[in-house]
Image (cartoon, grey):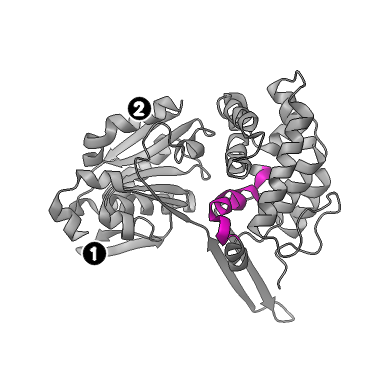
Amino acid sequence: MSALIPQNIPLTADLPFGLDVTSDVMLKHVQEVLTAFVVSVKDKALSLEDILVSFFTNKGVKDLLVAVSTLAVFSHEIHTQFQEHLHLLTGTKQLKYFYNLPLGRLFCCLEDFWEGTAEAEWLLNLKTRVCTTAALAGTKPHQFFKEKKINDYKDFAEHVEKLDPHAIYPTNIYRQCDGYTVSNEDCSTIESVMSTTLTTTIKTRKKVLDLADETLSSIYRPLGRVVAIIDDKVEGLFGEDLTKYFAHHNIKYQKVVARGNEVDKSLEKVCEMLHELKKNGVSRNEPVLIIGGGVIADIAGFACGLYHRSTPYVMLCTSIVSGIDAGPSPRTCCDGFGYKNLYGAYHSPILTITDRYFFTSLHEGWLRHG
């Protein structure tokens, strides 16, 4: 048995998990904590902000968030132990970085845990209110703590900054970097080993653009907008559906339409996409949405890999090739000097969605080719 939680965790919390936390244990505990919190506030006349203050200062909630932030969410062991409730793992991996997770996204991550509980309806209403309140949805907990003078997490932040600084100051919550150095006595020679661990999720869906489906809205509603790179042929077939979907969820939809033919796999097209990402002010932690087949997956994924040195993206696959190969693959690329895939980078999407409904637009030859 190896410890999934470091031994020297902050003393400000009574940790609810043991050394070998399983999805069953975590699910049961999170449900108990959330239910107890709701019971403590639901009959009080509180504003939304006051409810959030009560949420973060609730001892059970605080201990829960601190415990999750210390989980080794990138380890093979924790993935194995969550296999029975795999749908909880994506949210758990993001909750590790709750200190920098937008409030709207934080409650979206918790939603899978509270489903089926007696207070699920109340919690869903709370999540909806947070996600639809622009002043709160994109606010990060550490900003909220400062504004509301919540000091409950101060000792935790100071401790974890030394133990696992990436949990407090992540450049990207979808990857984890590590390394060590060794030098000789006079430091004339230094050897170093550096590593980057990436996390990604692959989901198969049908009609992800159905207005009731929250696969995409749960990601982009807390951000208030989505910047999308979309294949021109997909735009012609499903552009109206995309516009309606994001409008329904009150998400500003900023699209970049690009050609996705083999001849378009050029460095010039990648640079055009980089220009569009900059023009739209995409930040280094804002997932771009890429919609299309294999070519769009290659060149738009490559553009995201170059932009800010690694901008996250969600891949919505609309062809067989992108759905089973190019979409979830970390290999992004473009052609150059007459050579196929001469330029490239390993940059996997944070989420790949293979939606079989899009395949209905493909003629039989493309299906057989895929």
Residue 86 sits inside the magenta stretch: yes
Task: Identify the residue shown where x is 43% and y is 35%.
Answer: 226
Regarding residue 170, the answer to whether it shows in the image is yes
The crowding category of the residue bearing disc 1, from other C-alpha atoms within 10 Å (few below 14, some 14 to 19, many at least 20), is: few
**Name of the residue lying farthest toward the right:** 11
Point out the stretch of residues depicted in magenta: 82-99
Quarter of the image that includes the C terminus? bottom left
Q: Is residue 313 above or below residue 130?
A: below
Kind of residue at disc 1 = Lys
Marks 1 and 2: which is nearer the front?
2
Q: Position of residue 266 (x, y in %)?
A: 25, 54
Q: Which residue is mark 2?
A: 244
**Name of the residue lying farthest toward the bottom:** 184
Label 2: element kind: helix
Quarter of the image that includes the N terminus? bottom right
Kind of residue at disc 2 = Lys
Q: Which residue is mark 1?
A: 340
Task: Using the image as rendered, state which of residue 36 and residue 294 is in the foreground.
Answer: 36
Q: Using residue 232 as the reference point, say whether residue 69 is left or right of it.
A: right
Residue 58 sits inside the magenta stretch: no
Q: Is residue 340 above or below residue 55?
A: below
- Quarter of the image where one finds residue 241: top left
Q: Position of residue 50 (x, y in %)?
A: 75, 24
State whether the magenta stretch is mostly helix, strand or loop: helix
